[in-house]
Image (tube, grey):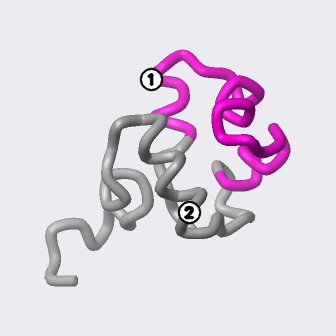
Amino acid sequence: MNNKVKVERLTLGLTQATLAKKLGITRQTVSLIEKGQYNPSLNLCIRICNVFNKTLDDIFWPSDIKGEDR
């Protein structure tokens, strides 16, 4: 899964550990999400978006199909 979690985390100056604490998950889980090796639940996706003040589309919609009919 392509996502922009790492980009947004770095933009806010957060470490993986800090983001993990805000989300109630482990740093390892954040790492796996950023690498696309773990697909978070919808609930976790929403919590991630809330931390970044972004929409699901902003963070999790593949950029190569952004703007196309969904």
* Magenta part of the chain: 6-33
Earlier in the chain: of badge 2 and badge 1, it is 1
Q: In the image as oriented, which residue stretches furthest toward the bottom?
A: 70
Secondary structure under the numbered disc 1 in the rendered image: helix
Q: Is residue 36 above or below residue 48?
A: below
Q: Which residue in the protein does label 2 denote?
A: 43
Q: Is residue 50 placed above or below 21 in the rendered structure? A: below
Relative depth, front residue between 46 and 39: 46
The residue mark sitting in front, 2 or 1, is: 2
Residue 7 percent location from the top left of the image: 48, 36
Give the amino acid type for the residue marked by disc 1 in the picture. Thr
Is 22 included in the stretch rendered in magenta?
Answer: yes
**Residue position marked by numbered label 1 in the rendering:** 11
Residue drawn 56% across the image and 38% down it: 6
* 3D distance between C-alphas at marks 2 and 1: 23 Å
In the visual, does 21 lie left or right of 12?
right
Name the main secondary structure of what is drawn in magenta. Answer: helix
Measured along the vertical axis of the image, is residue 64 above or below residue 52?
A: below
Crowding around mark 1 (Cα neighbors within 10 Å: few <14, some 14 to 19, many 20+) is few
**Which residue is outermost to the top?**
13
> Where's the N terminus, which quadrant?
bottom right
* Dot 2 crowding, Cα within 10 Å, few <14, some 14–19, many 20+: few
Q: Nearer the viewer, residue 27 or 23?
A: 23
Q: Report x, y in % for residue 61.
A: 37, 65
Q: Secondary structure at mark 2?
A: helix
Residue under the point 52% across and 46% down: 48
Amino acid type, label 2: Asn
Q: Is residue 17 magenta?
A: yes
